Image: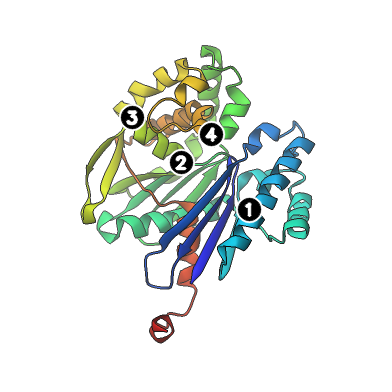
Amino acid sequence: MRLGVLDVGSNTVHLLVVDAHPGARPVHKTSTKSVLRLMKYLQPDGSISKAGVERIMETMHAAAAHIEAANLDELLPMATSALREAKNGPKLLKRIRKECGIDLQVMSGADEARVTFLAVRRWFGWNAGRILLVDIGGGSLELAVGTDELPELALSLPLGAGRMTKQFLTDDPPSDSELETLQAHIDEVLPEAVERLGELRHADQVVGSSKTIRSLARLAGSQAEGLGGNTRTRLYRWQLEDWLPRLAELPSKARSALPGITQDRAFQIVGGGTVLLSVMRALDIERLDISPWAMREGVLLDYLDRLPNDPEKKRK
């Protein structure tokens, strides 16, 4: 069965195509991505600007063409924080449905955390024990903790890398005063989540997912031998503390020349890194194990789990 996940996020429109069936690991076929950067189109009243709407429609028409060419059995189209929170989001969703034939399902922040936690649990397995998940998207930060496949607590905070960059880091590179203002904002938003997580039992393993965290880990992290021939990437707090001030001193064009920092993430990597370091300090996290699976894989797994598992049908 060929499945596609269309993820309309704050930074990109990403189509992931896999071959999959219940009980099996999804096999990657193709991946197509268009840079969106929706946060820069948000207006003071909370709506997406006319230029932003046209940029979204351009990327959605392109995505529709890729979807048609992929010959999918099922498409799982989803939208996250940028469209969820935009004042004109409902109107835009109707236009996308009418013009492109794509019925985007808007995910709540808690649902984002839940399906990402599922993907991380499947990747690391039961041997990981109790997991604490940290995921930084363009618009929001997701935190989740649990021992099973569903988290006991799933939280979403408006501390995404793109959102923080647009609101606080307008200079390139950011000024010291901008960085201080950003840090003060994070310190104001984060404590409630830290308190709620602190009421629960500590995790055995802390996992980081999302492109922002993977990028920082490729730049500053280290690798260790994993099971099944997979290399395990880790990011220690001291490594992030060492690299983040240096990243903040570089203009975004120079950052994209560094290992792991792609051009589409270069401008917001300092904002995302500041959020991540704040989380690691607040929750006393010394090390993150990096998951290559995140929300898109979680959406696929959640869908497959809901299908009947018929071995006879799979053999045919």
Residue occupied by mark 1: 63
How far is the residue under mark 4 from the one under mark 1?
Answer: 18 Å
Cβ–Cβ below 8 Å for labels 3 and 1? no
Residue at 46% over, 15% down: 249
Element carrying mark 4: helix
| Distance of label 3 from label 1 (alpha carbons) | 33 Å
Residue occupying image coordinates x 63% and y 62%: 68
Give left or right: position of 236 versus 107.
Answer: left
Q: Which mark is residue 264?
A: 4
| The residue positioned farthest toward the bottom in the image shown | 312
Question: Nearer the N terminus, badge 4 or badge 1?
Answer: 1
Residue type, numbered disc 2: Lys
Provide the residue designation for mark 2. 211
Amino acid type, label 4 = Asp
Distance between the alpha carbons at the discs numbered 2 and 4: 11 Å
Q: In this rendering, which labeled residue sits more in front, label 2 or label 1?
A: 1
Q: Residue at x 22, y 49 (%)?
A: 226
| Secondary structure state at the residue bearing disc 3 | helix
